[in-house]
């Protein structure tokens, strides 16, 4: 195997590895998002079951802090993903130059700067960013709400009464019956 063939093999391996790492980063982000969303929804449900408004406020404050960390993690994951795609694209360009092919591969046409006019470009990136920012804003609003209730002394009646839970259950049952 001569030097040229070794370089071509190395560049092919570089493309493959960087695309695999990019896929791994996306899988990490999807897993984290699923777990994070479940924890937030479960925690908020528990918050409204607490009778002590001060404890609910502290838990909500912690959730808001974790929400900020989740936004920062999402940004970092996006940077790592973009870096792996850029490295793979660079290796692909070098490989194609060595074999005499000028056109980009399908994967890199999708990510190239030439396609920035494409309205679908970056849709997943924007969706994740909006999801995390939306959750963070909702948690911040809940924290402010619970803080006000805890300070005004109205936090003792934070939990849902059994009558309101029964009314909600009846309402949901009517909706389910209407869909049948």
Image (cartoon, rainbow, N blue to C red):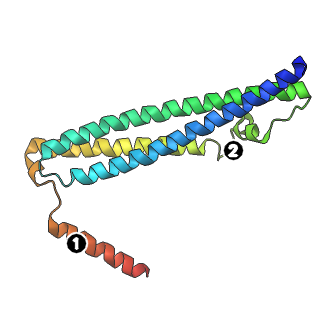
Residue 136 visible within the image: yes
Residue 89 visible within the image: no
Where is residue 12, by image quadrant?
top right
The quarter of the image holding the C terminus is: bottom left
1 or 2: mark nearer the eye? 1
The residue beneath circle 2 is 118
Q: Percent x, y for residue 120?
A: 64, 47
- Residue bearing mark 1: 167
Q: Is residue 38 left or right of residue 76?
A: left
Q: Residues within 10 Å of mark 1 (few under 14, many from 20)?
A: few
Q: Which mark is residue 50?
A: none
Evaluate if marks 1 and 2 touch, with contact meaning CB atoms under 8 Å apart.
no
Give SS at disc 2.
loop
Residue 158: x percent and y percent? 15, 53
- The foreground one among 31 and 37 is 31
Q: Is residue 85 left or right of residue 135?
A: right
Which residue is located at x 88 percent, y 17 percent? 3
The residue positioned 74% from the left and 26% from the top of the image is 90
């Amino acid at each position: 195997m001569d030097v040229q063939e070794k370089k071509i093999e190395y560049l092919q391996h570089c493309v493959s590895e960087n695309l695999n790492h990019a896929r791994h980063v996306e899988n990490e982000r999807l897993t984290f998002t699923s777990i994070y969303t479940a924890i937030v929804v479960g925690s908020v449900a528990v918050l409204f079951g607490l009778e002590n408004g001060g404890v609910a406020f502290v838990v909500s404050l912690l959730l808001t802090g974790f929400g900020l960390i989740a936004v920062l993690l999402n940004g970092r994951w996006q940077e790592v993903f973009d870096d792996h795609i850029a490295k793979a694209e660079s290796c692909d360009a070098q490989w194609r130059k060595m074999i005499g092919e000028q056109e980009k591969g399908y994967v890199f046409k999708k990510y190239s700067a030439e396609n920035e006019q494409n309205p679908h470009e970056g849709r997943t990136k924007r969706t994740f960013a909006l999801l995390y920012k939306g959750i963070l804003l909702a948690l911040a609003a809940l924290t402010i709400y619970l803080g006000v209730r805890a300070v005004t002394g109205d936090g003792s009646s934070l939990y849902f009464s059994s009558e309101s839970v029964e009314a909600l259950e009846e309402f949901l049952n009517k909706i389910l019956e209407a869909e049948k």
